[in-house]
Image (cartoon, rainbow, N blue to C red):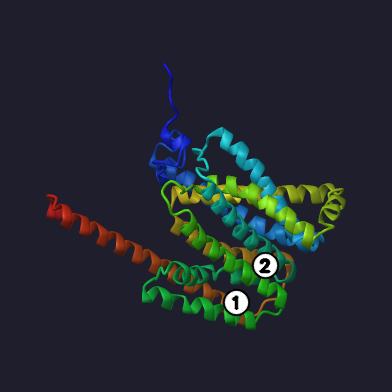
Amino acid sequence: MTTTTPTHHRTNSKYLPKDWLVPGLEPQTKAAKKVVTIVICVLWYTCNISVVLLNKALLTTFEFKKPVILTLCHMLTCSILSYFVSLTKIFPRQYVQTRSQLVKICTLAGVFVTSIVLGNVSLRYIPVSFNQAIGATTPFFTAMLAALIQAKFESRVTYISLVPVVVGIIITTGGEPSFHTFGFLACVGGTFCRGLKSVTQAILLSSENEKMSSMNLLMYMSPAAVVILIFVAAVVEPTGVYDTLELLKSPFFCFILWANCVLAYCLNLLNFLVTRYTSALTLQVLGNGKGVVAAGVSIAIFRNPVTVQGMLGYFITIAGVVAYSESKKRTVRIRSLSRGEGVMKDNRPSVNPSKV
């Protein structure tokens, strides 16, 4: 008698969000789930801030002025660790179904690594606090690109909430004592690409058979990103490998680079787990708070100067992002209720009025 693997372990069909973690690994009680959720959120904060600060330290303090090579190290580590984690079957593995799907994943990889490289480039020239302030405008780019590319429009209130996001970053930029034009443009470009990646992913992997959990998508995007980055590094940083090998002679630098790469992968894993145990909206809210904490910690460590105008602008931006998140949440809730009412009217089920 032969046994077969459950469908959601080997194909993309019936692969629902609830199946994105192998059954048996879930906490069995509400108290246990609450503890696990808190631990995961704390680890997410720690990894997120650590990666940003270590990137800054590597690119400035350690004189590792190779942002493309640094991104290549991240993606190479993600490729290796993704493969080994997939062997543990912590999350069900999905497979690439068609050549078209593979091309779409490679396209996403290109946009993904562009955003990371530009973000790392910006850290060479501008402080982490300014980098995080600009990064907070990602929802603005995502909303604008969704409207332009997908013709997907939000409510008027949602668009109004984006006004302080833009106004705040303009105020912050005007009050930034460490402003660097190239670093600023690189960071804006990276933020734009993050928004483009979200929109592109929604377009390219919209089919039910092509949807993937974030960890499966990372597993397939990482090798494609490595190939892309090898060619980019050969052109942009031709001496990058030699310079990196020279720096690796220092055990301390070697440890910091290794820790940075492992934490970069762990951050992706924790992104997945935070979304799994809470929601995508919670992850966005945590991200808003992370930017503030990372900015504060970086100021304390790197002693970069800040101004009252810069701080005021940053908090206006964050307030706008929070308002945007709340508006999106309200819109999703209203749309869900509208769809539910439509189903009830069509099917005319017997409903207990006390439970409506």
Question: Is residue 356 visible in this depiction of the protein?
Answer: no
Question: Image point 66% across, 60% down: which residue?
Answer: 52
Identify the residue under disc 2: 128
Residue 129, percent across and down?
A: 65, 69
Q: Is residue 41 above or below residue 328?
A: above
**Side of 338 relative to 197 (left or right):** left
> Looking at the rendered structure, which numbered label has been put on residue 210?
none
Which residue is farthest top?
Answer: 1
Query: Mark 1 or mark 2, which has the lower sequence index?
Result: 2
Compare residues 12 and 335 and report the one nearer the observer. Answer: 12
Compare residues 41 and 180 and report the one nearer the observer. Answer: 180
Q: Quadrant of the C terminus?
A: bottom left
The amino acid beneath tag 2 is Val
Mark 1 packing: few (<14 Cα in 10 Å), some, or many (20+)? many
> Looking at the rendered structure, which numbered label has been put on residue 311?
1
- Alpha carbon of mark 1 to alpha carbon of mark 2: how far? 13 Å
